[in-house]
Image (spheres, helix red, strand yellow):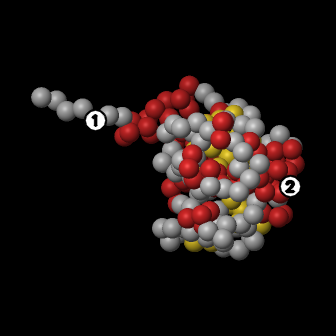
Amino acid sequence: MRLAIVLHEGFADWECALLMATARAHLGVDIEVVTPDGAPVTSMGGLDVSAHLSADALDPAGFDGLVICGGAIWGTTDAPDLSATIRSFHREKRLIAAICGGVDALAASGILDRSSHTANSADSLASLDGYQGHGLYRDQPQAVSSNRVVTAAGTAPVTFAVEIFRALGLGSAELDHYATLHGREHAAATTAA
């Protein structure tokens, strides 16, 4: 199994880190780092990452899925146009996933007009030119998976990873336990009297 993970200048370190580490180290999934132009990028936190490929060199036939990381670039004119790549993966029935601002790239490509999805907010997507998926937006804190499209707010990297694994057929009782374990810090705190 092989995933293409799109990172860009100023990508949000935490949004795909758990996904990438778990996929590679525990599930044996090959991870290929992709940048818009194949050049190295630096994360928000200062992590320098070298690319394996550029976005225009991606061939869906060689991958099981495409994952787009979020970051502040998506709200700017510097955001890369990945629409052709996203649509080619969608045509080939490959998994497509995006988190945080990366969901903007899916909205721009038009694929969210036919799949249930979430994002940082409904308002963030509503302001995008061409976005017609308003009725399919789900206002929830967890990732949404629909028709081999996985979306998540930037605050949901755990369920984002889990829904990607499930969509790839890697779901299991162990994965469910993993999600519960990582989600425990978000459970309501209780205090003993």
Which residue reaches farthest bottom? 39
Disc 2, SS: loop
Task: Give x and y (percent) for residue 154.
Answer: 52, 51
Task: Give x and y (percent) for residue 98.
Answer: 65, 49
Q: Residue at x 62, y 50 (%)?
A: 126
Location of mark 2 (residue) = 59
Location of mark 1 (residue) = 189
Q: Is residue 183 visible?
A: yes
Q: Report the front residue among 133 and 63.
A: 133
Separation of marks 1 and 2 at Cα, in angstroms: 46 Å
Q: In the rendered structure, find residue 130 and report the number of the disc placed on it.
A: none
Q: Is residue 60 left or right of residue 133?
A: right
Q: Residue at x 72, y 62 (%)?
A: 34
Q: Report the front residue among 105 and 193.
A: 105
Which residue reaches farthest top? 173
The image quarter containing residue 71 is bottom right
Q: Does residue 118 lie above or below 58 as drawn? A: above
